[in-house]
Each structure stands twice: as structure tokens, then as C-alpha cells.
Image (spheres, rainbow, N blue to C red):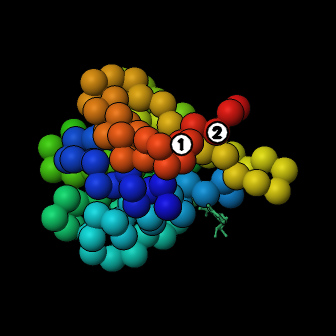
Amino acid sequence: MLARALARHLRAGDVVALVGPLGAGKTCFASGLAEALGVEGRVASPSFVVARFHDGPTPLVHADAYRLSGAEDLLDAGLDDWLRVAVVAVEWADLAEEALPADRLTVALATDGGGRRIELTATGPRSLRALEALEHDSSGHRDLEPTS
Ligand SMILES: Nc1ncnc2c1ncn2[C@@H]1O[C@H](COP(=O)(O)OP(=O)(O)OP(=O)(O)O)[C@@H](O)[C@H]1O
Ligand SMILES: [Mg+2]
């Protein structure tokens, strides 16, 4: 699973921006990250809270911008503090872009006919490092970037 492979290369301060329509698999991806990071608790749809903090060797904050009234809420909830200690995964990240660091790994999920598509985009040195490490893992094994 891509999320598990990616998790091995994530460090505190990394931001994973999960985008894609309803039911595309954003929560599922966050759950895969949580499992691979070995954090406490189970990832659920953070429907009634802005974010959940999962403690662990590398903690994970799982946030859902769909529930926020704007980027401000994410900052008020403590984004800056989280970034010091945790990997931060944000569902519907496109709705809170202004609150997020420019350097983030965007995971675009799409359902496509019967299939699923994942596209990863890095927008800075930090996210690029994680993406390149992931690509290095799999070079020669499989194509991580299906044609779009
Ligand atoms: N890679 C996958 N392969 C097969 N099924 C998947 C995959 N990812 C997600 N699903 C299934 O699709 C459904 C929706 O997934 P999920 O809740 O992760 O979507 P979401 O993008 O978080 O939705 P929302 O926009 O409501 O937050 C779930 O039933 C889940 O089991
Ligand atoms: Mg979800």
C-alpha cells in the first residue's frame, strides 16, 4: 500500500495534503499512514473534531478541513505546534491551503471508472525528499505515477 510505503519516509513537520472528492479514499490513506507509523488509536473520519492527535514514535495529526470554517481554524487549533512534533495529514487540504506550509506533499486521490488513481506532488525540498525516497524504494518495481 502506498500510504505504508510513504510513511517510512515521513518525519515530524511533514505535511501530507489529501485531496479528492467525497469517498476518494482520503481517510483510508490517513489510516494507512497511522498504521505504518505505529501511532496510537485508530484513524476515523474526524467528523466532529477539527483534528486528532495520535501519539507514537512519530506522532500523526489527522485533520479534516471540510469541518473547518476556514484556514484560520486550523491555525487556531494549533497547526504550528503540531508541525514541531508530528506528521500532519489534512483531508480536504485544498479548502485550507492558506494555512498550510507551501512545502507539502499533495496526495490527489481519484476514483476513475472502476479504478482508483493516486498522484503525488511535492512542492518544496522537504516534500521532495520524501517523494524521492519513496520513488527510490520502488524504482524498477512499479510505476508510482499512473498516467493522468
Ligand atoms: N484504495 C482503496 N481501495 C479500495 N477501497 C477503498 C480505497 N480507499 C478507500 N476505499 C473505500 O472507499 C470508501 C471511502 O473511503 P474514505 O472514507 O477513505 O474516503 P474519503 O476520501 O475520506 O471520504 P470523505 O470525503 O467522506 O472524507 C470506504 O468505504 C473505503 O473503504
Ligand atoms: Mg474522509
The quarter of the image that holds ligand 1 is bottom right
Question: What is the three-letter code of the residue carrying label 1?
Answer: Leu
Question: What is the three-letter code of the residue carrying label 2?
Answer: Pro
Q: Which element carries disc 1, helix, strand or loop?
A: loop
Q: Which mark is residue 146?
A: 2
Q: Residue 81: name its quadrant.
A: top left
Query: Counting other residues with Cα less than 10 Å from the Cα at mark 1, is it few (<14), some (14-19), or many (20 or more)?
Result: some
Name the quadrant of the C terminus.
Answer: top right
Q: Which mark is residue 144?
A: 1
Q: Nearer the viewer, residue 130 or 51?
A: 130
Where residue 61 sits: x, y (%)? 31, 56
Where residue 1 sits: x, y (%)? 49, 61
Q: Nearer the viewer, residue 99 or 57?
A: 57
In three-dimensional space, the C-alpha distance between marks 1 and 2, rounded to whole angstroms, equals 6 Å
Q: Nearer the viewer, residue 60 or 126?
A: 126
Going 31% across and 40% down the picture, which residue do you hit? 133
Where residue 95 sits: x, y (%)? 54, 36
Going 22% across and 60% down the picture, which residue do you hit? 59
Going 50% across and 37% down the picture, which residue do you hit? 120
**Depicted 9 relative to depicted 75: above or below:** below
In the picture, measured across the screen, residue 15 lies left or right of residue 145, that is: left
Q: Is residue 95 visible?
A: no
Q: Which element carries disc 2, helix, strand or loop?
A: loop
Query: Counting other residues with Cα less than 10 Å from the Cα at mark 2, is it few (<14), some (14-19), or many (20 or more)?
Result: few
**Depicted 13 relative to depicted 49: above or below:** above
